Image: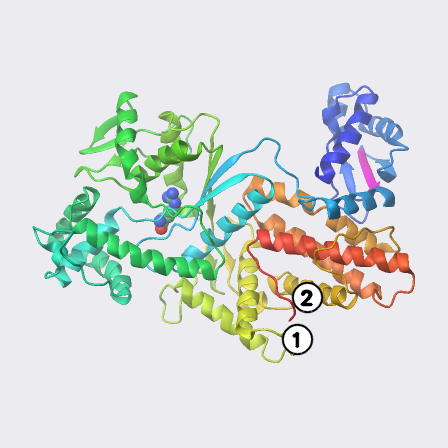
Amino acid sequence: MKKLTARLTETVSAAFEKCGYDPALGSVSVSDRLDLCQFQCNGALSGAKIYHKAPIIIAKEVAEALSGASEFSKIEAVPPGFINLTLSDGFLLSVINETARDENLGVPQCEKPETVVIDYGGPNVAKPLHIGHLRSAIIGEALKRTARATGRKVIGDVHFGDWGTPYGLTIAEYKVRHPDWACFKEDFDPEKDVIPDIDEAEMNEIYPFASAKSKEDPDFKIASRQTVVDLQNRRPGVYDLWKKIKDVSVESVRKIYSNLSVDFDCWYGESDSDQYTGELLKILTEKGLLHESDGAQVVDVSQEGDKIDVPPIIIKKSDGSSIYATFDLATIIQREHDFKPDQIWYLTDKRQNLHFVQVFRCAKKAGLVPETTELRHLGFGAMTGPDGKPFKTRDGGVMQLSTLINTVEEAALEKLKDSEYITGDRREAAHKIGMAALKFGDMQNQPLKDYVFDLDKFLSFDGKTGTYLLYTVTRINSILKKADVGFDEVLCAVGFFGKSDRDLALALALCGESFEKALADLAPSALCESAYGVATEFSKFYRDNRILSEGDPEKRASWLALCLLTRRLLVKLLDCLGIETVENM
Ligand code: ARG
């Protein structure tokens, strides 16, 4: 099904053309003043400059040409030259009934099938996930689901950090602590020798310790650098220990992602791109892009007109080891090889922006992907405490993601303590409600902005919260159950009977718009807006009408059809946001 504004644009464009104007002027958008009209077209204002005519004259001509169009009940040309449009009941009704019957529930499908790789999550081996990893995981998951809902082929890749400096440090420190482990013997034999099991608590503590130590202890620093080189050369023992550490990390990270309902199609890491490093170097050398700088191999990526300094990108350090940028470039070759993506999206903290500018420029210069492939970095702001500073634990440390999840879940459980409506497992319900509160509290913001973590607000039943949205769904569940309507049925409405059912129908008809907007801006906040818009209109509709006791069968059936479509669309929007609903609460 086409987007509603796209359909209206077709009609209005035809009217512009009929009057002898460029049809491209007929673009229709949702009005910013819903109290005045529902849609508007500002094409007459731009047309005035081209045709040297007063905009209001053009607007009036087009409005005249539109009169009789079945889509509209009101068409007005308003000074200085706006065309204000209000939908007819018949048309709005046909749109929502078509939405109800559409297998994609009105979500516009992308015209040519596109492949998108989304690089999100970005955990690191031997480091526990902390709250800084939350946004990449949940925003990435939401964009993946949203892009899939529009018919795109999407591959989510976790891109584990597992092949750089930190692992040299970590393994070097293991050697200091456990010099007797078989993996550190010169004649280590992977077939016969056994490496002891990795203790997760020690693993989590070892990297920060080793990182601090390397700043004070030059010998240790040298040893750890050599260890990275050994690791990247897959030296027996070092490589085998690394594999064990990685297994433990992956296992622990998987659990937390699954708790957040975040899932990946590929669990690749930096180390998986290693097989393409040779090809990368070959291409860069052949194209004459690589040169030496202080012993390192670099590529210049600055461009004329740069407002900030864009330094050369380092491909190989002087000791021959690969670094973060090398892995990202080699991974681009890998993705081009495996998926030929039309787009690759990267989700990280916005502080990594310069890194991605360097990587993207180098990739394009070297022709690692076709010129048309879109490489996009979505850098986002931080979750902060009430003081606006990055969120910290009571003792000033960085909170682990698993602790954050538990805190939110406990708070939700406490909040539901007296609810008599929860029938099933309370902890399960608290988990879903807590995650809805947390995710919606995060994603309703523009990704680029910092936002304040305010659990009381997130868990409130009123206002723009995930809790309010789940609550709205449970209210509809209860109506539908009492009316004996199945959640998967398809019902159609036959008319509107007041302002609030018409307003709700318009909010439902506009849901499809938010999917493209979310993808164009890489911002799930568009879906949050849409879901919240539907829920508030539903609340008014619910307040104004006695649905179940309504005596007029046409009214009752139409209202139930609206309830059902509201539920289906809310569930779909929430699902695309990675939010699960509950039966009752
Ligand atoms: N592991 C990285 C970090 O912790 C994030 C990885 C993001 N993805 C990428 N392709 N660079 O900062």
Q: Secondary structure at mark 2?
A: helix
Which region of the structure is painted magenta?
82-88
Extreme-bottom residue of the structure: 418
Residue 189 image offset from top left, x and y in percent: 12, 51
Q: Are marks 1 and 2 in contact (CB under 8 Å)?
A: yes
Query: Label 2 amino acid?
Result: Thr
- Circle 1 is placed at which residue position? 421
Who is closer to the viewer here, 534 or 554?
Answer: 554
Residue 350 position, x and y percent, is 43, 47
Residue located at (77% from left, 54% from top): 504
Based on the displayed image, in which of its 4 quarters is residue 204 positioned? bottom left
The residue labelled by disc 2 is 474
Residue 133 x, y percent position in the rendering: 42, 55
Q: Confirm whether residue 507 shows in the render.
A: yes
**Within the image, what quadrant is residue 84 found in?**
top right
Residue kind at label 1, given as amino acid type: Tyr
First along the sequence among labels 1 and 2: 1
Colour scheme of the rendered structure: rainbow
Q: Is residue 88 visible?
A: no
Of helix, strand and loop, which mostly describes the magenta segment?
A: strand
